[in-house]
Structures are given as C-alpha cells and as structure tokens.
Amino acid sequence: MSVNQHTHAGPPYGQPQPGYQGYQQPAYGGQPLPGVPHAQYGAYNGPMPGYQQPVPPQGYFPSLGFPSKGSPVSLNSDTSLAPNLIGSVRALPTSGAPPPASGTSLPSGHQGYSQFGQGDVQNGIPTSTAPMQRPPASQPFLPGSAPAPVSQPSTFQQYGPPPSSVQQLSNHMAGMTIGSTSISAPPPAGLGYGPPTSVPPVSGSFSATGSGLYTPYTASQGPPPPSVPQGLPLAQPPFSGQPVPTQRLPTEVPGFAPPPSSTGIGPSSYPPSTGAPRLPLMPGPPLSGQTVAGPPMSQPNHVSSPPPPSTLSGPHPGPPMSGLHGPPPPTHPPQPGYQMQQNGSFGQVRGPQPNYGGAYPGTPNYGSQPGPPPPKRLDPDSIPSPIQVIEDDRSNRGSEPFVTGVRGQVPPLVTTNFLVKDQGNASPRYIRCTSYNIPCTSDMAKQSQVPLAAVIKPLATLPPEETLPYLVDHGESGPVRCNRCKAYMCPFMQFIEGGRRFQCCFCSCVTEVPAHYFQHLDHTGKRVDFYDRPELSLGSYEFLATVDYCKNNKFPSPPAFIFMIDVSYNAVKSGLVRLICEELKSILDYLPREGNMEESAIRVGFVTYNKVLHFYNVKSSLAQPQMMVVSDVADMFVPLLDGFLVNVNESRTVIASLLDQIPEMFADTRETETVFGPVIQAGLEALKAAECAGKLFIFHTSLPIAEAPGKLKNRDDKKLINTDKEKTLFQPQTSFYNNLAKDCVAQGCCVDLFLFPNQYLDVATLGVVTYQTGGSIYKYAYFQLETDQDRFLNDLRRDVQKEVGFDAVMRVRTSTGIRATDFFGAFYMSNTTDVEMAGLDCDKTITVEFKHDDKLSEDSGALLQCALLYTSCAGQRRLRIHNLSLNCCTQLADLYRNCETDTLINYLAKYAYRGVLNSPVKAVRDSLINQCAQILACYRKNCASPSSAGQLILPECMKLLPVYLNCVLKSDVLQPGPEVTTDDRAYIRQLVTSMDVAETNVFFYPRLLPLTKADVDSDSLPAAIRNSEERLSKGDIYLLENGLNIFVWVGVNVQQGLIQNLFGVSSFSQISNTLSTLPVLENPFSKKVRSIIDMLHLQRSRYMKLIIVKQEDKLEMLFKHFLVEDKSLTGGASYVDFLCHMHKEIRQLLS
Ligand SMILES: [Zn+2]
C-alpha cells in the first residue's frame, strides 16, 4: 500500500446537500438498535432488537503474502516460558451501585420558565408550562440501570400536566451534592473522572463532566473570605448548608501604593477605591412561573451609572483598578467597572513581592516576614482576585439549578458547582460561549475585539443527577430537517399553517412537515406533542441515524481496540512491558459498553514491535496464541485477519496466555531501535480489513530511528528559542504523519499515544496522528515503575473505558448573520465546515469562532446548532444535536456585561498556541496583549463613565482578563523556562488544544489550598488562596494542582507533629521528596489530605503527578513556576506588573 495515498475521497455519506454536504436526507427503514442504547435513553419510537455482532472480517489469511517468517509460530514452542496460564476468568464488570432511579420512573414535576423575550416565537421554549421532566439521570453505561425503552409516544402521556413546580425544584435541590458530600467518604461515583486511584475501575464509572466539578467543596468552603461586598442580599436564600455570603469587612480597604518607578507607570498615589458594589444577582435561573423580562442580569456590572466621584483621581497615569475589596458605597448603583485609585495615603503599602527579580534560590521572604524597605507599589489585595470571583460566583449561583430556558443567559462559572436543567438550550457542560450577547453588526464586533467563540464538548459526561440526551428514532425517514440548510428539528423551528409546514430558525426556509411527523398546534401555535418530543423541547438530544448517514450506505460494525506495545530494550528493562500486559488482562473486562449490553461489542487485537512488528492470532479455537512477524516494515500489511481482532470473552484464555508470554519472550531483547509509522499503518490496515472504526493504543518509548517510513531524526535545538525559527520546534519534521493521519481519519482510526521517553522523541511529530484523529496523548518522562505506575495505570484505565464516538463529523450551523469561521481542537478538516474526528471522547473539546456575515437583530437573537454524527461504541450510528440561543445587542455595554472570561481565555490560549506554528512566539505574545488591550480600551471608551485617564476601569465580567492572560503569556509554550523541554512544550500545546473551559481555567491559574487550614472534622476544602509566594506561610503545608500535577509544599517551620502525621517521619529534613503518594497513616490529618487528593484526582481527566516540595529545596523552583501571580524566573511579569503594563497599553490606545 502507499501510505501517502490520499484515500480520503470526499464525504462518504451520500449525496451532497445544500448546506450539509455529504449527509443525505435519508430514507431508510428501521435500524436495529442495541437493547437500550444509553442508560437513560428512552427510545421514542419503539424498542429495537439487539445489535448483531458482525461477521469476522474476511480477506487475508496467514498464508497469503506472509513475507519473512513463514508460517505462524506458536508462542508456546518455548514451553519453559509459556506456562499457558488460563487467563483468570474474570467476572463481568459490575457496575457500581446503580443509581436508584433508572429512568423508568418519570418525575412529573414541571418547571416553568420565561419565554425567550420573543412573544412571536410560537415553538420556542414554552413560557409557563414546562417540558416533560426527564427521568432522573443515572450513570451512563451502568448495566442494569437502563430503563426499558419507552416505546410508544403514548408513554409520554404520563408526563401530564405539571404539578407543583416548587416540589420539583426542591427535589432537584435535594439531589444536589452541595454541602452534603463528605470528603472523607468516597466521592459519589459520578463526581469525577476515572476510577478510584487504586481500585480497578468499574465499568461506567466515569460519569461526571469537567464542568462544575468542584462539587463537594462549594458549600463547605466556610464563609467566604471577607473582602468583597455582596451589594445586595441574595434574592434567594442560599442552598442549605451553604454559608450565607457575608458582608466584607471594611478593614480590607483597598489601597494602592504607588507603583515602583520601574513599572514605568508614572506618578503614583491611589485614592482608595470605592469598591463598586455588585448588583443584586439573579441568584439562579428563573424559577417556575417566574417571568424574566429580558436576559437575566447574571453579570451585575452595569455600565450606565457614573463612578462615584470620590474615586476620581485626576490625571494620574498609574493604574487605577477595579477595586474589588472596598466596602460598598451604600447607595451606589451598579458600576461600569471598578476603579482603582491612586492615593498613597490610603490602604496598605505592601513590600515588593518576595523574590522580586531576586535570583533563585535565595532565601525568600515569605508573606509573614517583614520584607526589605518597601518600595511603594500596587497593593495585591486591591487588584481583582480570581479567588474572590470564584467564591462570589459559588455563593451567588451555586445554590440553584441553571435552567436553560432563557435565551442568552450567562451560566455560572466552571468553578461553581451547579445542576443544569435543560429547557431548550444546551447545557453549559456542552457549550460555553465567550459572550452570550453578540453585537448586531460586524463593526461593533471589530470595535470591541471580543472574539465570538463557543467551546463545545459534544460528548461531555454529565453528573449523575442530570439526564443524558434522549435518543429519538424517527424510523426509516430519519430526522426531520430543513430542506435548505439541513438544520435538524429543534425547539426554535416555527410551525405554521396549522402545523403542516415549519419555518427554519436558521435560514427561514419553509419546509413541509412529513406526514408521519404532522401534529396539530395548540392555541398558542405550539405543537401539542411539544413535551413528548425532545427535539421540540430540549436543547440537547440524539437522533438515530439512518443508513444514509453511514459510510458507503452501510451500517457500521462495532469498533475495535488494538493494543500496540513497544518491546524494545528500554520498554522491557523498565518493567513497562510486563506492567502493560498485566494490566491489559484485567482492563479488557472494562471496555465501553452501551446501555445494558452484557458485554462490550468492541473487539480487541494485539501487536508488539521494535524494529519489526509482531502480530498475534488469538482466535478462541487456538490452544495457544500464534505470532506472526512482519519485518518488511516498508510496505506494511496485516498478515492475518481471522483471529487478529477477537471478542474478549471468547478468546479470554488465549489472550491471557499471550499477555503472560509477551514479557517473557522479549525479556532478553537487545533491540533498542523502534519504528513508529509502520505501527500506525498496521493498525489502520487491520481496521480497514475488518471494515470498522477503532482506536489504537500505542505504548511507545523512543525516537523512531529505525529504517522505516516515518523514520525521524533528532532535531531538537533549544537554541532556537526566541528566534524566528522557534516555530519549527512545533512543526512536524516530516509530512509523512500528516498524510497518514488523513488515511486514519477516513477509516475512523483514532490513535491514542502513551509515551515513555528517556530523551527527546519529537512529540511534535509523533503527536500529529493522535492530534488529527482526535486521540489523546500521555507522556511519562523517565518512567519509573515505582513512582509512575499508578499514574500511568489510572490514565490507561480511564482512557480505555471512557465514552468515545468513532468516525465522527461535527457541523455547527448558525442563524443568518453569523457563521463559524475557525476551529480549534484535535481533529481533521477536509473542507471549511466539517470537523472530522476518527474518535471523539467525552473529554475532547472543540472551540469554534464565529464571524458576522450580515447584521443580526436584537429581536431574533442568534442561534447555534452543533450536530455531531458518530458511531457509538456498540456500532450504532447517531446524531447528537446541541442547540443554543444567544442574545444580540446594539450597545457594546450589553456585550461586555454578558461575557465569560474563562471561556475567552480558553479561546485565546488555543488561538495563541496554534499561532506559534507559524509566527515567532514573541509576535504571538504581543498580539495577545494587543487584543486584550483593545478589548479593555473599547470598554473604557464606550461603556465606562467618563473619568480620569489615570484610572484603569475593567468590565466586571472581564476583571480577571489581565491576570489570566498573563498566565497564558507565561505558560511553558509561550515563555519556557530552562527546565522545560521541547517535547514538554509540544505536549502541553497539544493538550491545551483539546481542553474544556474548566481545564484551561485550572491549568493556567492553578488551585492553591492551605492543607494545614483544612478542617479535619468537616467535609470542606480549605478556602483556596491566591497563587503568590507572599500568601505562603513557612509554618504551613499547601497543595497546588493544575490538572496535570499536584504539588504538596511544606514550609520549613511546619510543626513536627504535622510532619509526623502526614509523612510518617519525625522531622522536616527526613521528608522524602521522591514520594509519589503520601503514606497511608491512621490520623485525621493524613486522612483528610489524602481524601482531598483523591477528590482532586476524580475531578480531572488525567491522573495528576504528585510532587512533594520542601521549602528551600531545589524542587521549589519548579513549584514557584506555578505561583502565577509572581514574577517568574524566566522573566514572566507578576500580576501587578502586568496590570500596570496593560493599563499603559490601554492608555496608549485611548490617547
Ligand atoms: Zn434552514
């Protein structure tokens, strides 16, 4: 075969259609469906027969074209090495405790909500009655928990008229985990990603999503730190168990010391800020029956009111800031922004940040120590605090479900734990936007420079309390779509002419309603079956796809997993090969399954390789596995088909025998060289021959220098950093892998890569196929069994088990006036609209940017519809639809009031990280700074009240933009430290590209928790503190996590008793900084800390590496790198300095 051949020959999904090429309007009859597709899916149109296991692939036979080693070799020929263990017959994976309510009982409660502000949209979300309540969510994939398919529409009669909505609401509240989750108890299975750290995962145990995963802590944080006034009392009492937000103490009056002259920001006295009060927040989504007359004021900052005169500070050029911490002026109306004032006589004058510009590793001054004579500078307490913003949002919005029935509603922050009720718009777990109010014109959008983007996670896992999207089966006719733009039926389509036709909400085209879909309208113009149909009443749902949505007009076979293990010298010697083989024996019982299927439909195959490839025949009828060696790697083919991909249960004995034998067979290998390209080619060929999609799990250790296609050379050169050629470090060194990736995408072959390098192996090149096929990459540098095996095994278990769709194509449609113009993420695009992913798992996120192509109207707003066509793990072809309606504005102030900075940062980081491929890093950084300065200058110019040019006025919703942006600028990709390798940078770059908003949030601004402040008797987490060295006390122990690492920092003065309790040693000097886990000690402090760490692991999609850092130890440099508010050792600005710099930039733009 020719690997360079472009086999991706156009859209394989039928005839091109206007608007949605490749997906034909189907006409098909009755698709078989697994007994129950998803645990919560109620099929709408009848039960379906079980899915058929496909016939084993035909084609190759071992005797055909087997090149070098002749006939199959029985592995058992060396009997001394092959004990022929009968693979321990493992019980079928059992689910964790199944959720009590499995979806068969349908809650009857209803909740009303307001209209979209458009009285004329008849088929939008209802105004006062509620859609049917979905069955309580249970966890996906839990066998036994799936409801029987709801087979007839009449079933939905039981939804009936809405009973008391209050009851319903309280039920939901009772279901929330806030305040009731014990940290020391095992977390609810649905809360985190991944299996418990040391217990073999249970099938289907991954049911939580990344968003809002701070669950158990939210309510138990204790009273919020006393600094920000909540302008007005909450309209709703806080959720039970949640502390009532307290008034900030006026003692923390913000003040600004003059900045040091080195900041270049002129004179310097800051009058005290009158911290602008927050507006009363709408504490949550509207409740039943409540009418919201407009977009909820979820972001309290108003732009209409003048700043308090007393805050004006004259012509000072220094950085006035949004003073968050001042007591609220009692009568103040909402403020356009917080003003930071200059007046040296007010507020605290802080010393410089410790170690400012000082050379590491000097003895730092910790916060509690008196510093050197203080050059007066901006008081860090008076500038916007991420911790405070997070706390405020938790207090204000964590207690009520977020109901999606209102257009343009800004959701709670990703750091807030909240439940979502789908009432017509997609949950923020699926889609988050940079702004929920879009400028009506492109001129406005350009003026503001605020990027319009959506961060979409189509297969996001939901917490167990929420309901998975329903699966709708329209039978042979398939989903109802607009004739012109091919948008799918959704709550915003408007039925007219008595229900005989509908007008498209995206393109306005009128389409006949198919006879089978006809339904009468009620007196409000709404279809009477509104609540019976998810596609009319919900923001997210799925359609069963017909054969027209399938490649070659043929229903897909279930996918296959192929495990491909590097057995070169390093892999064997480190114990990795043995570890992987041992793990595979048990992990194969936890392959993804659908609904209540007894076993996974996924077939498995095994390959080992070094310079040559070894395929294994594990057919169930064999007494022993057979090995076939392919040494002609230049033209890769698969030497056997029958017996290569097998059902785990049928071939259990042979597989177990194989996995026992592999480590023995290669125990004495001296082969150090590896190939890589042929490995992927082999997997791809195997899937092609089996005519199925699938995933390759490749465990690889070294730069592939052996003679073969895709051979690489070591081209690492750190001298290129900060030169115009730096970008080449991020570019693949050959186009071979790009071409291979195309072939993989065409076949639905997703590649997950586990790397174990001891030196440079060119992640930028090896990662190409992983990246373009939607796969995941994991890296364990200098892998050591003792310290790294837990992390690797947890990652592997989760990766094998997680929900994944194959052969996926995503299209985002928009209403007239805007369109999707740019995409960021791990995927391949062969045209400008369709995002193709060989595999898409529940953690993968695609960021989409929109641009205007016409004017928008405030009345009609803007709509997005994300349609994802994919093959489920059982081989079922489906469409998942997410709809979101946004507001449109003619006033810039409305834009700034409805932005979400966390999402903005997600977009900006991905934009910048892509930029380094083509531009010098410095240019990328400058462009980021410039864009943000323009965003803030536009606000200042058009939205803020007139005030001194010396004031920095930040929009309330963007007051964290400077601090977060600075974190992006200082990140390893854009400003690497000396210890950061080229591979690290390429790796991080690839990870960030697929991150969701919660992940980028904690990645760029890590969470720092004072462990010694934790209350061992409560469930609560200690309140997080800001990421600065001056917040650390040498008498305390802290934990810092960023999604990839967990650091435990121990101060030099920590009490001996605490050290004993946590580490089991008697003194600071005896603490080992090579620990990869904390010792299990029977005392409250140890238990508490370990439970916190376990909880954090469950919240993240990857198992974090634990690193113990002793104060003043050499590892502390690594730790300080994550104290992102401080000046970094590599020259990254401190938060304070960066803020001053931003202010200067803004003033230049305004002058
Ligand atoms: Zn249309």
Image (tube, rainbow, N blue to C red):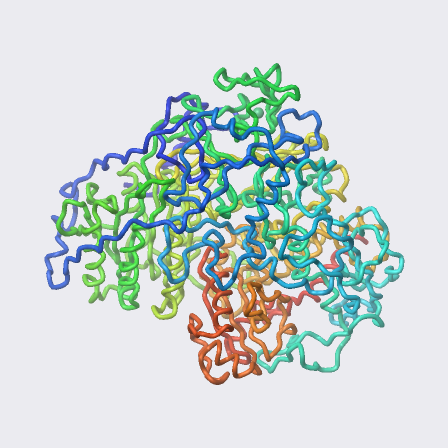
Horizontal side of 309 relative to 9 (left or right) equals: right
Residue 66 versus residue 77 in the image, above or below: above
Screen quadrant of the C terminus:
bottom right
**Which quadrant does ligand 1 occupy?**
top right
The image shows residue 65 at horizontal and vertical percentages of 17, 42
Tell me residue 1003's x, y (percent). 55, 59
Residue 274 visible from this viewpoint: yes
Where residue 1088 sits: x, y (%)?
A: 51, 69
Q: How many marks do you count on the picture?
A: 0
For the N terminus, the image quarter is top left
From the viewer's side, name the closer residue of 33 and 816: 33
- Residue drawn at the location 35% of the way across and 34% of the way down: 34
Q: Can residue 769 be seen in the rendering of this structure?
A: no
Answer above or below: position of 1125 versus 405: below
Q: Nearer the viewer, residue 110 or 343?
A: 110
Task: Name the image quarter holding residue 1127.
Answer: bottom right
Q: Nearer the viewer, residue 317 or 1101?
A: 1101
Could you tell me which residue is drawn at 56 percent across and 75 percent down?
1037
Quarter of image, res 892: top right
Q: Residue at x 50, y 46 (%)?
A: 462
Location of residue 423 in the rendering, given as x and y in whole percent from the top left corner: 59, 36
| Left or right of 215, for residue 759 | left
Vertical order, 386 against 300 (above or below): below
Q: In this orientation, which residue lies closer to the viewer: 623 or 208? A: 208
Q: Is residue 2 left or right of residue 975?
A: left
